[in-house]
Image (cartoon, grey):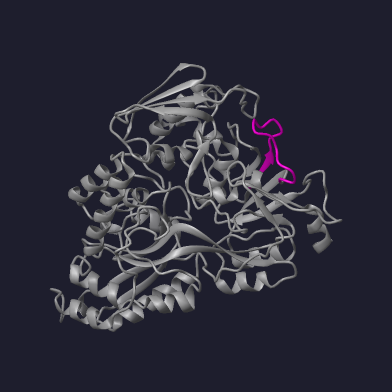
Amino acid sequence: MDVRRFQKRKAIGRSVIATAVVVILVVVGVGAYYVFVPGQGAGTQTTTPTSTQSTSGAAGTLSLTFANVPNADPAKGSDEASSAALANLYDSLVFPTSSGTIQKDLATSWTVSSDGLTYTFTIRSGVTFHNSDALTASDVVYSLNRFISVGQGYSYLFSPYVSTVSAPNSNTVVIQLKKTFGPFLSALVRLYVVDQKLVSSHYNSTAPNNDYGSTWLLTNDAGSGPYQMSSANLESNMVIKAYSNYWNGTQPYQPQTVNMIGSSDSSTVHALFTSGQIQITDQWQPYSNVLALSQLKEAKLVTIPTVNEFYLMIDTTKAPTDDIYVRQAMSYAFNYSSVINNIFPGSKPSAGPVPTALPGHNPSIPASSQNLALAQQAIQKSKYYGKLTNYPVTYWWVTQVPSEQKMALEFASDMQKIGVTVNVVGQPWLTVVANLAAESTSPNVVSITDGASYFEAGSVLQSRYTTPSEGTWEQNEWLHNSTLDNMIFSALSTLDQTQRFQQYNTIQQQIYNQYPTVYAFDVYEARAYYPTVVNWYAANGHPIVLLGYDFYFRDFQFYPSQLTALFG
């Protein structure tokens, strides 16, 4: 989610929380082979190595596929691959856990003023960047200011709120907010700290605003995280290697090298996985491909919960979907069960604008279900009733994910039952992003997956339904609703969580009553992997559901000798 907050976000590549549906399968257990022991971040898993496993740590390369090569600029990257890379290359003030809380990372303690506007952090001593520069409070100050200046990536979490940030001394950071932001501490998991001296030395004087070092950061890192960038080919892959001087040490059996391959092409992934060249598939594979791969020797199928939801975003300004009764009829006419049972097996019914697993979801909103009788009643109230053939609906699906086409065709078939003609059009993701930048080039309906940047409903409500999101991939609804904006931002400013959640509930109900979106299903990620080769906390029932954090490689255990035993 790229944002120039509050200017318009510019999407940087295909996002897992945007694009398309993940392939969803029935949850498959991975057995009791591993024992989970809570630890830093995701936690550390322990196994008893077999006779073929090295006890001196992994010397090989863990390889896995993503939809794209990461954008490793902390102020720009925000899709799945980028978020995973950033979590490994950089440290943040706090770190998310599998229980949905946060814990200390670069910040060892903090205090909050009684008015909720001043946050004071003590910064950990003894942390070094990958080039051996010492990390100090001034680097945190620089990183947050750079975030806001660049105005992309996850900056929308901070730009509306941060007034000033300062470093009274080398170990103290003071952040002064313009207005209260209840989930501020949770949002800080996205503030990735860069080396001020190093990044500043790579500004591009010929680019607007000197580009803040962004071009250099595409293929280099300036972080202090558990991994450092080894190489980056923006057309194919990024390789990262364990940082031996990481302040929190290294873990037994963590992979020493990780190859993040930017391809979700089914034939490519099939070939790489069957030959052992990758050990975890991306989540974008068709059901048939993942199922077939999971049946290979020593392979497993795993589905991992997320706080993402699949949406059919409806343009509320374009005929005939500018009519609330047309939108209501569409919501009732869609066959959700067919999608869940036949196209994305194992997915869970949605219930309104916020994923049901996300704290702050309104439990009184009913789960999405088909009701053709109510659909017929609604369409008959529409001002377009009797002349709907003159107003065909254009539906865009993302061509990188073939399963979306099946869903689009299901939607078209269902809409015929209420007299609505749907023209199904496949579009590349970057074309979708470009055309959603303007009302005039947006379709009636477009499908995306979107989700939370931090553990609260407000994250989704802000990114999906506020006016600043108009012109981004996250909102094709074009709501133009200042009242709704004020409600959402008022809730986000509420410090008391109970009161904040009550406001979230009211907001969700108001959005739901306007039928701006078809809430298709809650997302589970499905992947094939080799559990004897890679011990993965997310597959073992301890995911960190925020985007990217299921791939904190320091908490993986990797056994390349097992890979050799399987493939020679």
Residue 519 in magenta? no
Q: Residue furthest top?
A: 169
Image quarter for residue 136? Answer: top right
**Going 21% across and 70% down the picture, which residue do you hit?**
320
The main secondary structure of the magenta stretch is loop
In screen coordinates, is 519 left or right of 297? left
Looking at the picture, how far across and down is residue 89, in whole percent? 59, 38
In screen coordinates, is 370 left or right of 204? left
In the foreground, 237 or 361: 361
In screen coordinates, is 51 left or right of 506? right
Quadrant in the picture for the C terminus: bottom right
Number of numbered labels in the structure image = 0
Looking at the picture, how far across and down is residue 62, in whole percent? 70, 51
**Going 22% across and 47% down the picture, which residue do you hit?**
487
Q: Residue furthest right?
A: 51
Looking at the picture, how far across and down is residue 377, in whole percent? 18, 80
**Going 34% across and 77% down the picture, which residue do you hit?**
412
In screen coordinates, is 399 left or right of 230? left
In the foreground, 497 or 230: 497
Height in image: 421 above or below 254?
below
Height in image: 306 above or below 116?
below
In the foreground, 16 or 167: 167
The answer to whether residue 205 is visible is no
Looking at the picture, how far across and down is residue 502, in whole percent? 27, 51
Residue 253 in magenta? yes
The answer to whether residue 336 is visible is yes
Give the residues in magenta.
238-254
